[in-house]
Amino acid sequence: MVTIKELTELDRSKFSSAAAGWAAVSNRGNAAMDRVSNEMIAKLQMTQQGHAEKAARESLARLSSNFQYIHAECGLIRTALSGLASELEGPQRKLKEALADAAALKFTVEANGAVKYPATVPYAPNLSGAQPKGVPFAASADPNEGKARAIANRIATALSEASEIDGRYARALAKLKTDGNLSKTDWADVARDTKEMQGAAGKYLKESDIPKGKSPKENAAWWGKLSPAQREEYISVHPASIGALDGLPATARDEANRLVLAEARGSVKQQLWDLEHGPKPKYEHHINPITGLPLQGKENKRLDWENKIKYLQGQLTGMEQIQNRLDRTGEEGLPKAYLLGFDTKGLGRAIVANENPDTAEHTAVYVPGTTARLSNAENEMHKGLELWRQSKAMPGNPSVSTVTWIGYSAPQTARPFEGGHIIPEASSLSYADKAAPQLSKFLDGVRTAQGGPDASHLTVVGHSYGTTAIGDASVNGGGLGADDIVAVASPGMLVKHADELDAPKGHVWSEAASFNKDQVPAGGKIVRLGGDNELTPWLSPLNPLTQNVPSDRVFGANIMQTDSDDHGGYWKSDSVSLWNQAAVVTGNYDSVKRD
């Protein structure tokens, strides 16, 4: 229990000073992590080869992780101390005001909070026990007794509030410890520490103050009103919420999402270890008593256990792929990567930028199609990276950022009976319908963080079903605000003509290989992902001829040459397909090789 003396003499500025010190350590940890990852490891990979280089790189990767751990934990300590200093101001002020009122009345406050007062009127008890009608009961005829009781209650309230605050932060701080040896469990511990601090500092750093369901402009306005210290504290304590806010600077989202990624990796590793080293469920055999055959659809705990491990291993693979990209900055001229979005829910989300989109003269957001998911992140990030390489190599050495947007739950099957689905998921519009508002909001956030629609030339590039999501966002989800749209191997964009999409007239582009190399555009017509054309009234609605897709000349897009040999080959290095995309992304329209 906090005493009157302790609370009265408390110098809250010492907590604030200590918080500033921990903040400095946290920031230095973050800067050191960035230097190790983006300078030292990259230069080592560029200049050295062999077993020694591999061993040194692994050591530096651990060092980088240690610095990030310092950044995370020290950031939590800093927030605890800042919150403690802030929250104790209220009860300390209440106590001092109560003590001042007692002194003004010449009352004496004892160490235990009792208040003594000089008597003003001798107490005369009512011996009859009768209370006059209409007169409220009075415990004493001395008016100082009521005043003393009120002051004593105020003192008790202040001390109780201070003790609750002190205990809440003390419990959270007691859990912020490590043995100095980062094991598989330490980042899982950081996740738990973060949750503890969210509870401890909930009154000081309110999660409810973080915008939810607001526009990117409203998010940016809220962020702009925060002090630098408040921003750092929100990133430390609520990284997932901050990392998901469209409209915030790429640097802030990247810092927050890197913490989320590290904590998620630790948590998944811990879950995998527990499953693999814990009791293994036995296979269950459910037999039909009549036929003697195995029953279908019965729960099998062993199968559930195996599927859980497989799912977690896939999630971990994707996270390792993302971390590898973050660590490769500087290698062979690779730009810094920014993690603009991340979570592990369902199939997982990952939004990774090559170069800072907030400052780039040209920005391309790539929307992947079927099979995009966290566990397959490397494949989609590779396409975004190849597009950056080719765009950067265009005449004039343009400033370019390419963003891989695995920001929606994409369909995972494209052929009948694939993955146990009679009807392939890619034939359904539901995935595009759900993606549309998310994509529109993200693109609005990119524009907001850049400073407006004229700050950067924005191209939205879609592959396969990703183009369907782009079309849905363009006409139903809230728009794109794009300067150019590139549709690669599109199965349809839900409109019959390019002019219906949210891009300036003449700025919709398409490339698709011939039918014998890529059947997706034709397949999109069959499942009606395109737009009804003028032949619709004369033919059966199920006839593919009634659908326009971007690779049809009647659709009105600029048809570009392609040398892809299949549905996934449009991002091969030095290919015509990739060149054309880069020409559009950088605004070199005259360099596009048209078909």
Image (cartoon, rainbow, N blue to C red):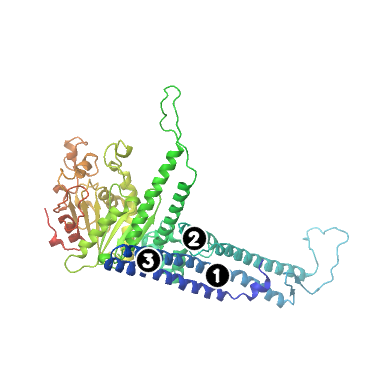
Residues marked 1 and 2 touching at CB (< 8 Å):
no
Towards the viewer: 146 or 215: 215
Which residue is drawn at the image coordinates 57% and 74% (left, top)? 12
Which residue is drawn at the image coordinates 14% and 46% (left, top)? 514
Numbered circles on residues, count: 3
x, y (%) of residue 314? 37, 49
Which residue is drawn at the image coordinates 19% and 60% (left, top)? 582
Towards the viewer: 19 or 211: 19
Q: Is residue 457 above or below residue 491?
A: below
x, y (%) of residue 420? 33, 37
Identify the image quadrant of residue 160.
bottom right
Identity of the amino acid at label 1? Ser
Q: Is residue 354 above or below residue 426?
A: below
**Residue identified by numbered label 3:** 60
Label 1, label 2: how far apart the Cα atoms are:
19 Å
Q: Earlier in the sequence, mark 1 or mark 2?
A: 1
Which secondary structure, mark 2?
helix
Identity of the amino acid at label 2? Thr
Which secondary structure, mark 3?
helix
Q: Closer to the observer: label 1 or label 3?
A: 3
- Residue lying farthest to the right in this orientation: 127
x, y (%) of residue 165? 60, 65
Q: Closer to the observer: label 1 or label 2?
A: 2
Q: Mark 1: few, some, or many residues within 10 Å (few <14, many ≥20)?
A: some
Identity of the amino acid at label 3? Leu
Q: Earlier in the sequence, mark 3 or mark 2?
A: 3
Residues marked 1 and 3 touching at CB (< 8 Å):
no
The reply to whether residue 593 is in sight is: yes
x, y (%) of residue 486? 21, 55
